[in-house]
Amino acid sequence: MAPQNDRKAKIAAAAPKNSGSANKIVVAGIVAIVAVIAVVAAVIFQQVSANNKVEEAKNVAQVDRVPEGTKDGEGWVSNSDVNLANGAPTIDVYEDFRCPVCAVFERALGHELETLAADGKIKLVYHLKTVIDTNTNSDNSAVSASSALCAADQGAWTKYHEELFARQPQEPNPFTDDALTEAAKGAGLEGEKLDAWQKCTNERTYVKYVQSVDEASFKAGVRGTPAIKVNGTELNWGTFVNQDGSANEAQLPVFEQIVTSGDVPADRVAPKR
């Protein structure tokens, strides 16, 4: 597919669709989000240009690097330093730090996944995507994702990941330099570690890697976020979340059983997008 056609396909894939499924995740807050997405493209671009200090980092010499243990286009394993249980399934999470529904997913189920990953019950692989960049003709999703991998270099992935979603700006606004720095401090980075994170972030170290991951996952059919796959089968994660976006506590044991067993029942498989 030609690059221009790729971009048109990505924009079309990122647009909201009415799947008619039984997913209960559509809550009142998401209705407001959809309304914001409808802003005229020219206005969106002006907002991004005016508010995004991170965009100014384009003038800094970029250092292109791939996270240790992976390669361009591949997801990043967040618990590679953990001894996995025998037969631990692979859980692939596809998300964009600026995606509002990704924030719902993370608030409801993210901690559960990270706990299982820390215990070695699952292999947790993140595919950091740039869906909102496609919508806004910017690269702030890629920049913020790069900053998260910079935090991972300093041993602060999990906390920074949480802090960044907690500071997610209203779409289509970008993360500012200050927001990223506050997230790093909130994740416990200070002194030399904070300086190293800042240098890595300023140099946009992992931006091209993140963009390569988005391209690879898009070509593989993952065109929206969030998405979660259990041993390659996409899980209908919305069935574990209440209409207000909170986790359905009664369903969490079922969620844990599915992701740790690697077996997704037919009634929990996500509908085709």
Image (cartoon, grey):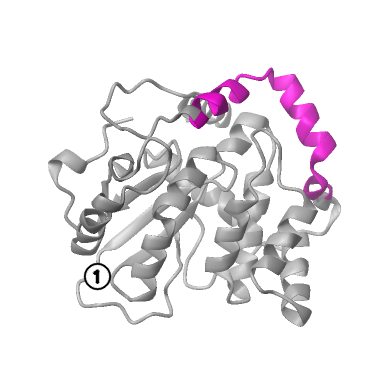
Q: Whole-percent x and y of residue 107?
A: 47, 51
The answer to if 41 sits in the magenta stretch is yes
The answer to if 236 sits in the magenta stretch is no
Please name the residue shown 23% across and 64% down the image.
260
**Above or below: residue 237 compared with residue 24:** below
Q: Whole-percent x and y of residue 217?
A: 43, 45
Q: Main secondary structure of the magenta part?
A: helix
**Above or below: residue 171 compared with residue 66:** above
Q: Nearer the viewer, residue 97 or 199?
A: 97
Please name the residue shown 22% across and 41% down the image.
269
Please name the residue shown 47% across and 72% down the image.
69
Within 10 angstroms of label 1, few (less than 14), some, or many (20 or more) residues? some
Instruction: Return the residue at label 1.
Output: 88
Q: Secondary structure at mark 1?
A: loop
The boundaries of the magenta stretch are: 29-56
Q: Whole-percent x and y of residue 52?
A: 79, 43
**Above or below: residue 236 compared with residue 112:** above
Tell me if residue 203 can be seen.
Answer: no
Q: Image check: 164 left or right of 27?
A: right
Q: Amino acid at mark 1?
A: Ala
Q: Whole-percent x and y of residue 257?
A: 20, 60
Q: Image check: 77 left or right of 11?
A: left
Count of labels shown? 1
Tell me if residue 118 can be seen.
Answer: yes
**Above or below: residue 18 compared with residue 190:** above
Please name the residue shown 25% across and 77% down the image.
85
Q: Nearer the viewer, residue 133 or 221?
A: 133
Q: Image check: 125 left or right of 207?
A: left
Residue 89: quarter of image: bottom left
Residue 191: quarter of image: bottom right
